[in-house]
Each structure stands twice: as C-alpha cells, then as structure tokens.
Image: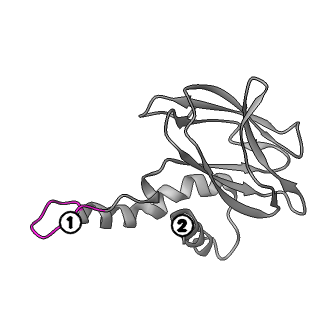
Amino acid sequence: MQLTRVLDAAIDSMTAGRVASAAMRAIARPIAALPLALVLAAGCSGAPGASAPAASAVDEPSVTVAIQGMALVPAHFSVPEGRPFRIVFENEDSQMAHALAIERGTSDVWRGTPVQGPGTATYEVPALPGGTYTVYCQVHFGITGVLDAVPFPMATP
C-alpha cells in the first residue's frame, strides 16, 4: 500500500470516517506522517548496528492534485526539474470522469488515464526539463492549471 493511501486512511479515521477533502488532506498529511518520520529518523541515527534505509518510492517527489467542482486544486504547483515524480490525483467530482495531461506549448508531454469520480489514482510522470507547463483535463478542456518544473530544492507557489 502506498504511503499516501496509508496517510489518507489515517486522516479519514481521524475525521470520523468522512472522506477528507483534498485541501484537508494537503494540510493533514504532514501531521499524519510525523510518527513515520520519527521512526525513519531513529533508523538513520548512525548508531552501531543501524543500517541505512533502502531507496524506495518514498524518495520520489510527489504532488497531490485534485479536480473538485470542475476546478484544478491547486491551480498552480511546482515539481523538481529533471526528476521523475508522482501525481496523486484525486477526482472529487461525483459521477464524472477526469484525466490529467501535461503540455508545453501545443505538445502533450504526458497523459494520464481517466479516473471516475469520486476516485484516486497515482501517476508516474517522467522527468520534465525546467520550465512552465499547462496541466489540463483531457475530458473537460476548460479545467486547466500551471505546473512549474524548477531546480531542486523547490518551493510550491
């Protein structure tokens, strides 16, 4: 099970079983991840007998993006240039399919598969050269946003 799904399940259990919104998840994930971070930090202490953690999917940058009310949330986000990353896509529009795509200029550089709402998918996106890209729904072309591929470390606008 992926870390975001585990964190989302923890968040949902903290909200009395109600499914949390994308905004709530974005705020709550770092808090829910704190116990895991403490365990991982303890394992990296350098104490005798401690081993270095293995490289894993957790090392790959990840961004959570939702379509909610026929709008991309957040509408503007950043990823590290030159590194593959994940998009955790949350379709919060009930009974409606959405599919993300990324383009630069007029050329698609990546296309995701459709997700029926409400639903979630995790997309593996190849490394993007630095620059500004348009993110859009392949089904509803009026749903758009901006992705910036920036030098690492980065800040999300």
Residue 18: percent from the left, percent from the top? 70, 72
**Image quadrant in which the N terminus is located:** bottom right
Res 126 quadrant in image: top right
The reply to whether the magenta stretch includes residue 110 is: no
- Horizontal arrangement in the rendering, residue 22 relative to residue 151 (left or right): right
Res 152 quadrant in image: top left
Residue neighbourhood size for the residue with mark 2, other residues' Cα within 10 Å, grouped as few (<14), some (14–19), many (≥20): few
Residue neighbourhood size for the residue with mark 1, other residues' Cα within 10 Å, grouped as few (<14), some (14–19), many (≥20): few
User: Is 109 drawn above or below residue 31 in the view shown?
Assistant: above
**Image quadrant in which the C terminus is located:** top right
Q: Residue at x 70, y 58 (%)?
A: 21
Is 120 in front, or is 128? 128
**In the image, which residues are magenta?**
44-53
- Horizontal arrangement in the rendering, residue 117 relative to residue 84 (left or right): right
Tell me how far mark 2 sits from mark 1, CA to CA. 22 Å
Res 92 quadrant in image: bottom right
Q: Residue at x 12, y 70 (%)?
A: 49
Residue 69: percent from the left, percent from the top? 84, 49
Residue 143: percent from the left, percent from the top? 83, 39
Q: Residue at x 75, y 42 (%)?
A: 101
For label 2, the SS is: loop
Circle nearer the N terminus (2, 1) = 2
Tell me whether the residue at label 2 lies in contact with that at label 1, contact meaning CB atoms closer than 8 angstroms.
no
For label 1, the SS is: loop
Q: Which residue bears the numbered disc 2? A: 2
Q: Which residue bears the numbered disc 1? A: 51
Please name the amino acid that badge 2 sits on: Gln
Colour approach in the figure:
one colour
Please name the amino acid that badge 1 sits on: Ser
Q: Residue at x 88, y 36 (%)?
A: 142
The image's mark for residue 10 is none
